[in-house]
Amino acid sequence: MTISFDEWRARSPFYDETHEAVAQSVRKFMAAEVLPHIDQWEEDGELPRELHKKAAAAGILGLNYPEEYGGHSEGFNVFHGLTQSEELAAAGAGGLGASLMTHGIGLPPILALGSEEMKRRIAPEVLSGDKIISLAITEPSGGSDVAQLKTRVERVGNKYVVNGQKMFITSGMRADYMTVAVRTGGPGMAGISLMLIETDRPGVGRTRLDKMGWRCSDTATVYFDNVEVPPENLIGPENGGFIGIMRNFNSERLGMAHGCCAMARVALKEAMDWAQTRETFGKRLGAHQSIRIKLADCARQIGATQAWVDLCAHQHMQGKGVPADYAMLKVQATRMLEHVVREAAQVLGGASYITGSKVERIYREVRVNAIGGGSEEIMLDLAGRQMGLG
Amino acid sequence: MKVLVPVKRVVDYNVKVRVKSDQTGVELANIKMSMNPFDEIAVEEAIRLKEKGIATEVVVVSIGVQQCTETLRTALAMGADRGILVQTDVTTESLAVAKVLAKIAAEEAPGLIILGKQAIDDDANQTGQMLAGLLGWAQGTFASKVDPQGDTVNVTREIDGGLETVALKLPAIVTTDLRLNEPRYASLPNIMKAKSKPIANKTPADYGVDMTPRLTTLKVTEPAKRQAGIKVKSVDELVAKLKEMGAVA
């Protein structure tokens, strides 16, 4: 029977003893540095900066980033990344991975499109945990419709001047740098650029947003009020930012889909432990046929989703991935998570409704997965268009 | 000074072991295995000695099946320099292990051998002591502090009633207690670097040691299930019940 990710890895063709070693190492990091504090961080609404440095020292922040910019990629592949995120999910607090690893969405556009000078200036201090970088795309006027974003940039002399607002920005309160999508040209996707903005520049303001879930992850509304930015902060060509935004999505969606599997396994484990110990009507809860069926059905859905995650990860590694597949995979994963955590809550009963249980926390994190990183509806519409129905 | 650390591959401490239906042992098929936690403490201590500039090289040894290589790799990822695998499929018993280690010690000439005080599978708590006996070296068991000073090492031991510190002349044997240190987690880059660190492949025959078990396991059974207790209302009732059971006179 394959329930835990340890068992899954042991029998999968995609994982070997180095993935096992990564799992062991990150598990110890979690036990020493995260699990004793996570409830406090959930209350605080953010992670301490110190954690980023500790995670960098453990090699967590730099995994699969180029060696010349302070990362380590030699011998590692996408499955080491999945293994790592599985362990980071063990706290049953998705905000941890979202906020500790925000550079996973903020840094790749710089590494893919930025100037050599920018890469050398930014990447090493982000991967060492000294600086925090966010990605700022979504605006108050809309998130899914990226091509219509309104944050405006004017060229004034030898400088860019930025005006606009960004919404729901993960790690936005603590970020030192932001990779920001702005409009430098005309309407539509052809007028969008990516720009690096240091948050200590005059005119940058931010407000904390409280959320249903992911509470240890700070989220902000960010305001740009006549922020002056030098031209060398442009990431890639002017008006060529859209492609940089899009290329981020595949790995982000793959990562989120795996994250959903990891969280679903945490919820299922909580429910199974409860079903093994709780007694009702003279026998173990799990010995009731209805409960047994519920839990097996959850395991079935997790396994099916994980198998597709692994396949897409393999395709990703080979450069054979198709955007529509990642989009549909993400929908599969978020719907699976929604079902599994619902059933886990039913099995735990009242205990799942009390603040502090992992299942209660994961239940509050279903929506951010189903909406963030591309809503289920946008994902399926994208796939439908690829099916020739556009 | 070279430090030698033997490491044993055991059932992971998180695994709830099940007794085999034929009562010959516990179920090991598809069970998660890891480094014996006491050995992890030993590896950590050796690496710390190296970081302090006291040790020059940390050599790890594992005796057992081929998969003990993974256990060695874990130690190498933590920071040990090289490994020795002594491969055997025979059940490893303390005396045979100590004999192999004595031969390796003669070859490697370490200043210090740090071992876990016991392995969590058989809980024998013998190997370090037997090794000290075979080598004729001083031993400091159940160490909660290890402090080498020139040609001696001060070992603090937790004993009934307090702490005892013994000064051992090097070369010496130290076995680790739980509170000696908290083992580090290997950083991810070091996991990959460990893949290229050398591991020498040996067999017990290379050391002229016969590993054939000398002990026979008669039977392995689950611990008896605990009976439900009863609540008593007063001390008098407690004493009466104990007398009834014959627990007190």
Image (tube, coloured by chain):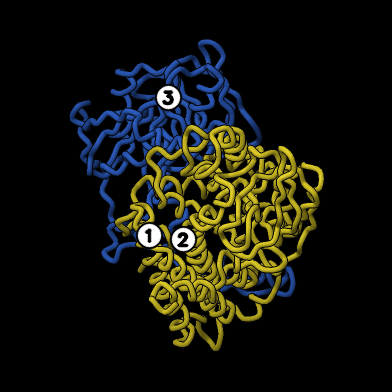
Which residue corresponds to mark 2? A254
Res A345 visible: yes
Mark 3 and mark 2 on one chain: no
Element type where label 1 sits in the image = loop
| Secondary structure of the residue carrying numbered label 3 | strand
From the viewer's perspective, tell me whether residue B136 is left or right of residue A184: left
> Where is residue B76 shown, x and y percent of the image?
41, 33
Q: Amino acid at mark 3?
A: Val
Name the colour assigned to chain B in the rendering.
Answer: blue
Which three-letter amino acid code belongs to the residue tagged 2? Leu
Circle 1 residues within 10 Å: few <14, some 14–19, many ≥20:
some
What residue does disc 1 label? A321
Name the residue located 42 percent from the left edge and 68 percent from the top edge.
A324
Same chain for the residues under marks 1 and 2 in the image: yes
What count of labels does the image hold? 3
> Disc 3 versus disc 1: distance between alpha carbons?
45 Å
| Image position of B239 with respect to A159: above or below | below
Q: Examine the rendered structure and indicate whether residue B89 appears above or below residue B18.
A: above
Q: Nearer the viewer, mark 1 or mark 2?
A: 1
Q: Do the residues under discs 1 and 2 have CB atoms within 8 angstroms?
A: yes
- Amino acid found under the numbered disc labelled 1: Gly
Rendered-image quadrant of the N terminus of chain A:
bottom left
The chain letter under disc 1 is A
Color of chain A here?
yellow
Name the residue that disc number 3 marks: B58
Mark 3 is surrounded, within 10 Å at the Cα level, by few (under 14), some (14 to 19) or many (20 or more) other residues, namely many
Q: Nearer the viewer, residue A219 or B184?
A: A219
**Spot occupied by residue A379 in the image (x, y as percentages of width and height):** 50, 71
Mark 1 and mark 2 lie on one chain; the one further toward the N terminus is: 2
